Image: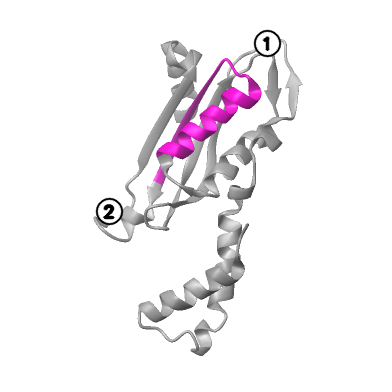
Amino acid sequence: MFDQEKIQQATRLLLEGIGEDPQREGLLETPARVARMYEEICGGMNQDPAEYLSTTFEVSDGGMVVERDIPFHSLCEHHLLPFVGKAHIAYMPNGRVTGLSKLARTVEVYARRLQLQERLTAQVADALMKELDAKGALVMIEAEHMCMSMRGVQKPGTQTVTLVKRGVFETDSQLVDDFFRMVRR
């Protein structure tokens, strides 16, 4: 899927476009480095979260499962600049749970794509509902966007928070309150 040569050509053109010399000693290997970097940080484009969420275990008690403070980084599709933050996930099992690491891997699969934070939040919640047949899912993401910190309005430290509720979390405010208590410690 990744065309290393196209990425390298684009990088050389970008360097020329900003007035740099791609043949300068310090920049000679930059196009290859950038191509490898994009293959790594956009690697989620070739992955399906179902690969991770398909491993489940039967449970008799379907209490809420919460995993908080999952670190992630992604690329804003508008500026190709990073946004970095933490995801907090809850789901209500429907007789089956997945391994805890699978929740973090699901965030990573979606984060390693060109993204919007709003879409990332919904994709994780929807994957939990679909792949786990969960009774409900709640995903909250807090992130700092470099497109706001480094350019434009230039307000470093500003956090964007998105929240998506599915299933029982849409109707049971007590579950939502419990989630916030657990996430906020």
The answer to whether residue 185 of the structure is visible from this angle is no
Q: Position of residue 166 (x, y in %)?
A: 48, 20
Compared to residue 9, the image places residue 120 above or below, namely above
Element type at mark 2: loop
The label shown at residue 155 is 2
Q: Position of residue 42 (x, y in %)?
A: 56, 54
Relative to the observer, which residue lies in front, 48 or 151?
48
The amino acid type, in three-letter code, at marker 2 is Lys
Mark 1, Cα crowd under 10 Å, few <14 / some 14-19 / many 20+, is: few
Magenta range is: 118-143
Element type at mark 1: loop
Q: Which residue is mark 1?
A: 61
Query: Residue, x 45% and y 22% (percent of image)?
Result: 165
Q: Position of residue 182 (x, y in %)?
A: 50, 24
Q: Position of residue 76 (x, y in %)?
A: 42, 51
Query: Residue, x 43% and y 11% (percent of image)?
Result: 171
Query: Residue, x 51% and y 85% (percent of image)?
Result: 26
Say if the magenta span includes residue 128.
yes
